[in-house]
C-alpha cells in the first residue's frame, strides 16, 4: 500500500509518496528531525497514526 507523508511547516507543506509503511516511517522520522509536524495519509486520504503505521511496517 502506498502512503503520502507530509511535513507541515509554518510556510506550507511538503509531501512525498512512498510505497511501504517502512518507507513512510523512515521519511516521517527524517521530517521530524527537522522539527516540523508530520502527517501520514493513505491514498484514501485517511490520516494514519504513527503507532498504527509502525504496526503495519512490522507486518510487511
Image (spheres, rainbow, N blue to C red):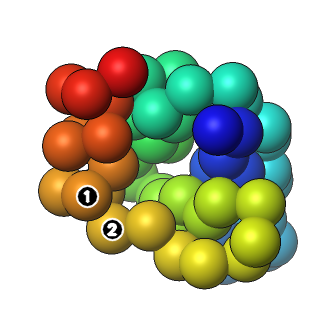
Q: Which residue is mark 1?
A: 52
Q: Residue at x 24, y 41 (%)?
A: 54
The label number, if any, that marks residue 25 in the structure image = none
Task: Report x, y in % for residue 21.
Answer: 46, 33
Picture layout, residue 14 above or below residue 60: below
Q: Quadrant of the N terminus?
A: top right
The label number, if any, that marks residue 49 in the structure image = 2
The secondary structure type at the circle numbered 2 is loop
Nearer to the camera, 31 or 26: 26
Task: Report x, y in % for residue 18.
Answer: 70, 30
Q: Residue at x 69, y 26 (%)?
A: 19
Inspect this view and state whether residue 6 appears: no
Picture layout, residue 24 above or below residue 60: below
Callout 1–callout 2 Cβ contact below 8 Å? yes
Picture layout, residue 47 above or below residue 42: below
Nearer to the camera, 19 or 31: 19
Left or right of 34 in this view: 10: right
Left or right of 2 in this view: 16: right
Nearer to the camera, 46 or 35: 46
Left or right of 45 in this view: 41: left
Query: Total marks drawn?
Result: 2
Task: Report x, y in % for residue 33.
Answer: 35, 36
Q: Residues within 10 Å of mark 2 (few under 14, many from 20)?
A: few
Mark 1 to mark 2 CA distance (whole Å): 5 Å
Inspect this view and state whether residue 28 appears: yes
Left or right of 48 in this view: 9: right
The secondary structure type at the circle numbered 1 is helix
Q: Quadrant of the C terminus?
A: top left
Amino acid at each position: 500500500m502506498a502512503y503520502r507523508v507530509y511535513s507541515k511547516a509554518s510556510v506550507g507543506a511538503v509531501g512525498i509518496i512512498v510505497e511501504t509503511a517502512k518507507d513512510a516511517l523512515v521519511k516521517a522520522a527524517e521530517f521530524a528531525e527537522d522539527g516540523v509536524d508530520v502527517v501520514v495519509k493513505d491514498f484514501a486520504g485517511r490520516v494514519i497514526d504513527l503507532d498504527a503505521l509502525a504496526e503495519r511496517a512490522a507486518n510487511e
